């Protein structure tokens, strides 16, 4: 028998306990051993919980219990779970976690502590989609050329509703909160930080690169308007919050931001709260992974798949997929060196000569305009919507600064990237 301790019996933890009980027959058959929850840890014992397992508010009752084989960390946060997981590993216990924030900051330290101990984290990225196993095992013969993912269901739900129903950002966010898709403070999801944590985990497995959230480009969806959506539709795009990891020579670019994506691409068709991840390998080509990215049962399914893998007795493959460092020594590409196409929204004075000034600023940065639309604005203003050919991020940022300095530009310019 394999006995587990669950640290954090919230939505996912309760689902793990329930599924292990309800599907005990098939889980035992697949694992070759019976798997039982010995105890769960919660912060507040007085709160009613729909679980039939012993509970405690003392994590040491799990960490110090010699009969517990696997510690399942589902508490959330960064530093507190780091110390819990580290202590569990130091006591020789296998670990399963769904905590992307923990791994975004401490994955390499924990890999060193784990050594040959099983440390699994399939549920940390894209919920029920087995993307970790796909990268670490199924695609291990490939150099990964790029990863492009919709890995936050809340942001995808909001953008999908805005695209399909013509609703503004604010009302859709309130609806998402009412449905339980968004938290009372939604910053983590709509600001791109949740997706960034997941992207960093995938990038470590694909490229062996150690970066923290503060090191990469992260932008949220708060500024997306119906004007942007109208432009996107007119030119055959949809707008998605993407996590992008891309190999560029001896560098890797990592970025999370809203992007205009051609409607013909498979990832553009991932709607609602669903997640989708496109991975391009140098030998296999493009593979696509689709499914629920969150929710108690979907995430618990991934957690239990890791528990079963450990119960089968298989040694953990290297936690982040590399038994030794890549000889190429890939480095993180500086944000300013990223090359992309861009979309801009400018509110300007509606008078002759303004277009010429905008074009002059862009020309001074050697940025070529590809398409432009003008919409009537409020009062004596107009809204310019334009897209560019490929240029460096530093040139675009300098252009944005210069544009905002023009007397004829009445609001701070809004910029999104075009990904194709």
Image (cartoon, rainbow, N blue to C red):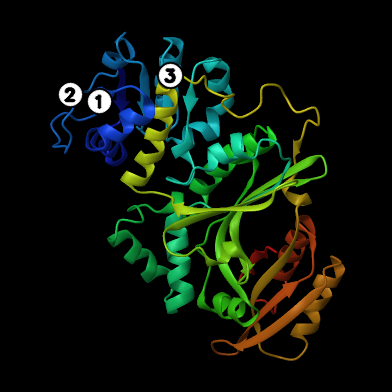
Q: Residue at x 78, y 87 (%)?
A: 353
Tell me: residue 278, above or below residue 71: below
Dot label at residue 54: 2
Answer few, some or many: residues within 10 Å of disc 1's Cα (few below 14, many 20 plus, some between 14 and 19). Answer: many
Q: Earlier in the sequence, mark 3 or mark 1?
A: 1
Q: Is 332 left, or right, of 85 in this rendering?
A: right
Foreground disc of the pair 3, 1: 3
Q: Which residue is mark 1?
A: 40
Q: Is residue 117 above or below residue 208?
A: above
* Separation (CA) of disc 3 from disc 2: 20 Å
Mark 2 Cα-neighbour bin, 10 Å: few <14, some 14–19, many ≥20: few
Q: Quadrant of the C terminus?
A: bottom right
Q: Secondary structure at mark 3?
A: strand
User: For residue 199, which quarter of the picture?
Assistant: top right
Image location (x, y in percent) of residue 197: 53, 41
- Residue displayed at 75% across by 44% down: 334
Residue 73 in percent (x, y) is at 37, 28
Label located before the other in sequence (3 or 2): 2
Residue hosting label 3 = 94
Disc 2 vs disc 1: Cβ atoms closer than 8 Å? yes
Q: Nearer the viewer, residue 370 or 330?
A: 330
Q: Is residue 19 left or right of residue 31?
A: left
* Marks 3 and 2 close (CB-CB < 8 Å): no
| Mark positioned earlier in the residue sequence (2 or 1) | 1
Q: CA distance from mark 2 to mark 1?
A: 6 Å
The residue sitting at 53% across, 69% down in the picture is 224
Kind of element beneath mark 2: loop
């Amino acid at each position: 028998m394999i006995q587990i301790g669950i640290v954090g019996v919230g939505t996912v933890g309760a689902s793990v306990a329930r599924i292990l009980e309800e599907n005990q027959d098939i889980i035992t058959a697949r694992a070759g051993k019976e798997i039982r929850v010995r105890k769960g840890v919660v912060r507040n014992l007085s709160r009613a919980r729909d679980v039939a397992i012993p509970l405690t508010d003392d994590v040491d009752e799990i960490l110090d219990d010699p009969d517990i084989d696997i510690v399942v960390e589902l508490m959330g946060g960064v530093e507190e779970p780091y110390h819990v997981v580290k202590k569990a590993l130091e006591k020789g216990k296998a670990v399963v976690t769904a905590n992307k924030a923990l791994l975004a900051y401490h994955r390499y330290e924990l890999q060193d502590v784990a050594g040959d101990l099983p440390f699994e984290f399939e549920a940390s990225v894209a919920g029920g989609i087995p993307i970790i196993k796909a990268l670490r095992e199924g695609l291990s013969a490939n150099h990964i050329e790029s990863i492009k993912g919709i890995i936050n269901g809340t942001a995808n739900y909001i953008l999908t509703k805005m695209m399909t129903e013509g609703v503004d950002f604010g009302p859709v966010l309130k609806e998402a909160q009412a449905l339980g898709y968004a938290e009372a403070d939604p910053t983590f999801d709509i600001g791109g930080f949740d997706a960034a944590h997941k992207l960093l985990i995938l990038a470590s497995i694909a490229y062996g690169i150690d970066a923290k959230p503060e090191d990469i480009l992260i932008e949220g969806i708060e500024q997306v308007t119906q004007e942007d959506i109208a432009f996107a539709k007119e030119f055959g795009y949809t707008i998605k919050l993407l996590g992008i990891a891309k190999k560029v020579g001896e560098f890797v670019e990592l970025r999370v931001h809203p992007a205009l994506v051609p409607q013909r691409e498979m990832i553009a068709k991932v709607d609602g709260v669903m997640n989708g991840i496109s991975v391009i390998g140098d030998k296999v080509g493009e593979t696509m992974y689709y499914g629920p990215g969150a929710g108690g049962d979907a995430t618990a399914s991934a957690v239990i798949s890791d528990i079963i893998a450990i119960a089968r007795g298989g040694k953990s493959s290297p936690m982040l997929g590399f038994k030794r460092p890549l000889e190429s020594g890939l480095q993180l590409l500086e944000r300013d060196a990223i090359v992309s196409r861009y979309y801009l929204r400018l509110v300007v004075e509606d008078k002759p000569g303004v277009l010429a000034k905008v074009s002059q600023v862009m020309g001074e940065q050697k940025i070529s305009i590809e398409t432009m639309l003008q919409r009537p604005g409020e009062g004596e203003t107009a809204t310019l919507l334009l897209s560019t050919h490929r240029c460096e991020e530093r040139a675009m940022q300098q252009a944005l600064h210069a544009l905002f300095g023009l007397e004829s530009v009445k609001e701070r310019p809004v910029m999104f990237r075009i990904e194709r």
